Image (tube, rainbow, N blue to C red):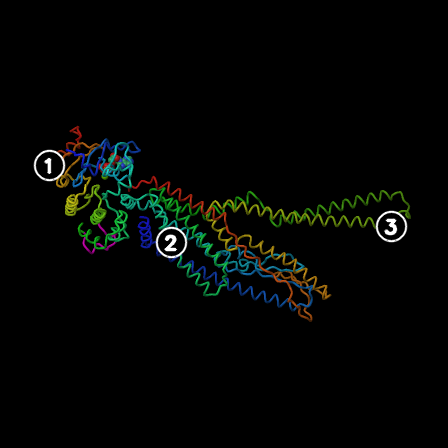
Amino acid sequence: MFATLLQKELKSILLSPKFPATFAVCAGLLILSISIGIHEYQVTTRQYETATQMVTQELREQAHWSGVNNRTYRKPDPMQIFVSGVSNDIGRWSGVSQFEPVKLRHSAYSDDAIFAIFRFIDFGFIVQVILSLFAFLFTYDAINGERESGTLALTFSHPIPRTTYLLAKIAGSWLGLVIPLLLPVTVGVLLLVLFRIPFEASHWMKLGGLLGVSMLYFSFFVTLGVCISSLTRRSNVSFLLCLVAWVFLILIVPRVGVIIAGQAVPVPTVAEIEAQQDAYSKDKNEQHMKSMEAKFRDREALMSGMTKEQREQYENDHMWSWMEENDADQKQITKDIEAQGVKLQEDLRNRKALQERLAFSLSRFSPASAYQLAVMSIAGTDITLKSRYEDGLRSYRTILNAFTEKKQKETGDVGGIRITMDSEKGMSISAPKENGTLDLTDMPQFAPPANASVMPVTDIGILVFAILAAFGGAIAGFLRYDMRS
Amino acid sequence: MEQTPATQPMIEALGLTKRYEDETLALDNVSFAVRTGQIYAMLGGNGAGKTTTINIFLNFIDPTAGEARIDGIVTHKEPLKAKAKVAYVSENVMLYPNFTAIQNLDYFARLGGKTSYTKNDYHDVLRRVGLEDEAHTKRLRSYSKGMRQKCGIAIAILKDAPAILLDEPTSGLDPKAGFEFLGLLTSLRDEGKAILMSTHDIFRAKEIADMVGIMNAGKLVMQRTQSSLAGENLEELYLQFMAGSVERAA
Ligand SMILES: Nc1ncnc2c1ncn2[C@@H]1O[C@H](COP(=O)(O)OP(=O)(O)O)[C@@H](O)[C@H]1O
Ligand SMILES: [Mg+2]
């Protein structure tokens, strides 16, 4: 019974005129996006390799350990072929030296702004936006369309349990769309092999995870389409409802989540933080000036009755302790200001994290966001990529600085340094290229942070819950569905 | 009508009453019985309650009171069991337009639990209902209403159920097709099917029915066997009952 129903669903999808059109669009887009992704990956990998070599070369040509100014590039990850995530938004390299803090600069989008406008159409995007639309397109009239065309009554003059029929409808639409999509995905996988993309076992597992989560996501839209269809009598009504649901789930909820979070947890801008910091240090310095003035007046008052000799004597006796006192005050102020800076940065980070968490929680009301977050964390191109990298770079900086200091002591060279300011490249500090080449053999190398691909349990849970809810709605609608035309 | 307890009716309505949600009383205490090898013609104008009756037999709607039974099975209590024993042809048979006649037949035969039919069986039954061979492999979208009705009866034949329900199956057919259709029904009756057909075609009803019931405003206002109708003017009777001038139900 189920097999018969399922077969019929598959057959009618394959025979329907909308099938070749949607299949062509999906297959074309998927293959195109994977090809472009592979190309981009190869280009960035080449860039990465050349740049890394150049840095090593430059290092070698430096004469003194004191001038060592390493620069570390972010290594492209082949998973970005499928889910680019934030990998194009965050900087591609950072200086690592004693003189500047770690900061990733020059994102792909800042270099090629045109891509920022159109974003990158990757596998995740195609599934999230286009396949969900197609899922609706194939299911919005699954039930009410059969009623309208009069076949539902004839079908249910046969002894068919309603749940069996509903399950077959869902499974049929699902398979009818998934099987043809396996084709372009297979082609994409072949392209990976053909172009020798360094896919290790862990990458294949992640790709499997991506496909699995994509299927969950896709199942949700198929089930929701059938649900909407079994809750309405007319297919033009369900079409409209599906469209509204799609716009709402894909375009509105994720953005509204971010907007609400932005309102609820305001995060100060960099300028605001700087202004606060400036105000604080100005305040501190003013306080210091005032206390200095007060002290000066006190001393003057004390010395007012003294003769010139007494005065000189007194000043000589106390000058040192006054200076020390002032010095200590100054140091304290600098320390306070620094501490305040750290505190402000920490506040900023905490608020940002809070805002992020709230935005994610709110937008997760849409399975589309849950899906997006899930695939990004599987691919390791999620929002934590930047901080993971910068954390890794900071610890590397500590190690590297310790190493260069040690080398400086060993070789006893201090060397002159040259500071160049460049609007393009920022500030760079280097030692004059004199004689020797540095022996870099035991210099610590930066190890890119392990692609911390996390199993997105919450998001998978949300997707499963959404599927069950849609299925429950479909069952509830269909069990009391009026089969009459 | 004598009823021997040994042979229970295949199709039976017992005090069938249906009041729709909007308070329309579509059926008011209707009772009748159709035995195997019988054709029962349910006559009545628009809104008499014919379709409502058939829909209760198919469990598309529940009765407000009374029971509809197929081979003794109460349709709203055990719908799946009842549906296994009944084939249905609607007023306007609708099939899958992207499928050929053969594909449609195969699908519905399987839904009816018949999995052993061959291509030849499908061709045979399509020929039997009067569809030319070249139409068998055409998609249904190119079919006329008459061809679809024929396909519908072919599906009913393939289901090989002891009871057949037809809701105005000849409405909209040309006279020749209608005549052929009734010939088919007679042959099915002779094979031992119990057939309940709603119609407003008095002449044809008289011609082939073993039993004629006249419905008006949800009531079964007259019921006669074919033999008792011999010599009577059914058209006149029908008009009388429809006008409500005879206040009695059979
Ligand atoms: N779904 C419904 N809701 C309310 N009233 C209905 C519904 N279906 C039919 N009726 C009413 O029930 C009565 C009988 O209808 P029907 O059984 O379709 O008659 P027939 O098939 O003999 O033309 C009519 O008055 C009709 O308007
Ligand atoms: Mg009717």
Question: Which stretch appears magenta?
Answer: B131-144
User: Which secondary structure lies at badge 1?
Assistant: helix
Q: What is the spatial separation of the Cα atoms under label 1 and label 2, in whole angstroms? A: 60 Å
**Left or right placement of residue A395 versus residue B168 in this view:** right
Residue B136 lies in the magenta stretch? yes
Looking at the picture, how far across and down is residue B72, in whole percent? 23, 37
Q: Is residue B185 left or right of residue A302?
A: left
Q: Position of residue A280 (x, y in %)?
A: 69, 46
**SS state under label 3:** helix
| Rendered image: mark on residue B9 | none
Residue A292 point in image, percent of width and height: 78, 46
- The residue labelled by disc 3 is A316
Ligand 2's image quarter is: top left
Foreground label between 1 and 2: 1
Res. B166 in view: no
* Residue on which disc 2 sits: A177
Q: Amino acid at mark 2?
A: Leu
* Other-residue count near label 3 (Cα within 10 Å), few / some / many at <14 / 14–19 / ≥20: few
Viewer-side residue, A265 vs A191: A191
Q: Amino acid at mark 1?
A: Ser
Q: Position of residue A383 (x, y in %)?
A: 54, 52
**Disc 1: which residue:** B227
Q: Is mark 1 within 8 Å of ligand 1?
A: no
